[in-house]
Structures are given as C-alpha cells and as structure tokens.
Amino acid sequence: MDRIEAEPAIAIGDDPAMQVDADPAVEFDLSGYLLSRQAVVESHLERALMPRYPEKIFESMRYSLVSGGKRLRPVLCLAGCELGGGERELAIPTACALEMLHTASLIHDDLPAMDDDDYRRGKLANHKVFGEGMALLAGDALLSYALEFILLNTRRVPADRLLRVMQTLINRVGVSGLVGGQVVDVESEGRDDVDLATLEFIHSRKTGSLIDAAMVTGAILGGADEDTIARLSGYARRVGLAFQIVDDVLDVTSTRQQLGKTPRKDEKAHKATFPSLFGLEGSMRQARELVDEAKRELAPFGGRAVPLLAMADFVCTRTS
C-alpha cells in the first residue's frame, strides 16, 4: 500500500497531568437538549424535500432523509453557531444540509458495491426498496441539493462567511475528507497489514470529516474568531474518531435491533477495526481518552460549552 500523507496524528492521552476536573455537564439535561434541537431539524427536513416531477427520485431521497437517526451533525452545527456568538436560526439551513450529506453517504455506503447492507436505521436500505440505480441517484441528488439548500435558504449571513461554509463542506465531503476515507477503506478490505495510522486515516475522514464540518461551519456562521474555530475543530476531530471507535465496538457487541443495521459486518468483510487491533476494552479506553482530550479543547469557554461537553460524554455511553 502506498504511503498515506495523513494529518498529524491525534495524541491519545499524552498528558496525564491535564485531567478534566469536576464536570459541569454532569447535571445537564442532554436528553431534553437533543430532543428540542432534533425537533427543530426534523421540522425543517420534512419541508425541505417536497415531491415533484420526477416523483420517484424525491420519494427515494425522502425515504432515507426523514427515516430518523440521532441528527448529531445538525445538532453540533447549531451548537457551534451558538457558542460562536450567533443565533441558532442562522445555522439551520446548513444543519439540514449536513444531514442531507450524511444521508447521501449512508445510501451509498449500503450499496452492494460498498458495505452491502440490507438495513439502515431499522428499515430496509434505500437500494432494497428503490433499486440500486435509484439509490445511487438519490445519494447523488442529496449531495448537490444540500449545497443548493444552503444558498437558497440562508439569511443574514455575510457572503464571505457563506462562501467559507460552502468551501468547508465541499472539502470535507470530497477526496480530502469522506471520499478519501472511503477509498482507503475499500482498498484496505481483506488486508491483514492495516496499521493504526491507516485505520485512523479512514475513520477520521469517513466519520470524523462531517462531524468536523458541523462544528466548523456552525462556528463560522456564528461569527466565531479563528481561535474558537480551531478549538471546535480539535474537539470535533477527537469526538469523531471516538464516535467511530465506539461504532466498531457496537458492531461486535450489539444486535441488529439495537443498531438498526446488520452487526458484525466489519468482521465478515475482514476489515481492520479498533477492536481487532486493541480488543473491546482497549478500544473503549482509547475512545474515553479522546473524549477527555476533546473536552479540554473547550476549557476556555466555561459554561457556554456544557452542551458540547455532555455530547462528548454521550459518544462513549451510547448503545446504538
């Protein structure tokens, strides 16, 4: 395998002296926070894709877009905007677009040519309902519609900020982000020599790139300064990697009913995962260390960061 020019590795637990002290997120009502923001996102997503000719493609797009899910990326985008000093409404179009981009990636990921899964979020995968050709087109359509949706619906945001948001999303979805991670994932399938650097490259882009995009674009829309944007990006990169590590663990330990998709897919496809390299306990330990590092990035923000602190903890305690 050719050498991968990766970003600097994320140090895991390299400074034992910097531990997170009393956690202000402990008393925070994360469930209520998530539900309220998920409801906002859901209401806008429901209206974002009104069927028109050709009806079948809109039916396919809507089938996957409004099929539920944690809506983590949109919620992070709204949180980033608020922490950056902006009103939540400024980021709603971008938050919805992030869910469209994420949904497009899931539709494509489930195709037989990729991860080949029949289920997603507890329902039949898009291609099992609409056929492979229509599923491929639905994913493509969501990718382009997401960017158009931002341009048509964003209000009261300076043009230079909006342009930076668009550039950030295009970068994180393309070969420098999600697509690049997927390419290396496909190339690594069935190999027994995949090392930690390659695995981190895959996960930081397949999963982490859109989580990073959510935080960064939210902060940009909110008018955050460069230090705040950099700190939120550092938080997001670590949370994104931790999220995928936990995903790897859940793939081994959960049922299809819990996951909403087929478990043990990685093992059957002979993919390298964190559990295959470090075991279940070792993987969770690394995830928790990443979450602690992510939370330290937020130290300068004090109480304003409590929702993000709580969401970081949620990454390691979730069961689906």
Image (spheres, grey):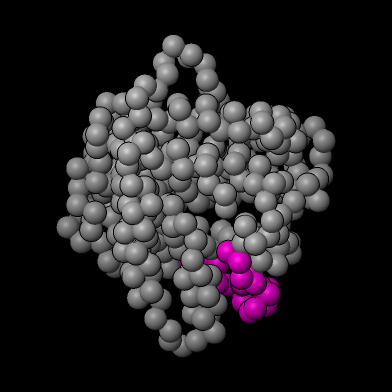
Instruction: Please determine whether, in this image, residue 56 is positioned above or below residue 266.
Output: below
Q: Report whether residue 127 is seen.
A: yes
Position in image of residue 260 (x %, y %): 62, 61
Position in image of residue 318 (x %, y %): 53, 46
Instruction: Pick whichever, 170 or 130, lies toward us.
Output: 130
Instruction: Pick whichever, 35 or 230, lies toward us.
Output: 35
Instruction: Please determine whether, in this image, residue 58 is positioned above or below residue 284.
Output: below
Question: Of all residues shown, which one is farthest toward the top?
Answer: 17
Residue name at image x 42 percent, y 52 percent: 73
Q: Is residue 86 left or right of residue 261?
A: left
Residue name at image x 36 percent, y 36 percent: 26
Q: Is residue 303 left or right of residue 106?
A: left
Residue 227 falls in which quadrant of the image?
Answer: top left
Instruction: Please determine whether, in this image, residue 51 is positioned above or below residue 220.
Output: below
Residue name at image x 52 percent, y 50 percent: 174
Q: Which residues are magenta?
A: 121-142
Residue name at image x 23 percent, y 58 percent: 89
Q: Is residue 221 magenta?
A: no
Position in image of residue 188 (x %, y %): 75, 42
Q: In what quadrant of the picture does the N terminus appear?
A: top right
Instruction: Pick whichever, 75 or 320, lies toward us.
Output: 320
Q: Report whether residue 220 is seen.
A: no
Instruction: Please determine whether, in this image, residue 15 is positioned above or below residue 52.
Output: above
Q: Is residue 134 magenta?
A: yes
Position in image of residue 228 (x %, y %): 28, 33
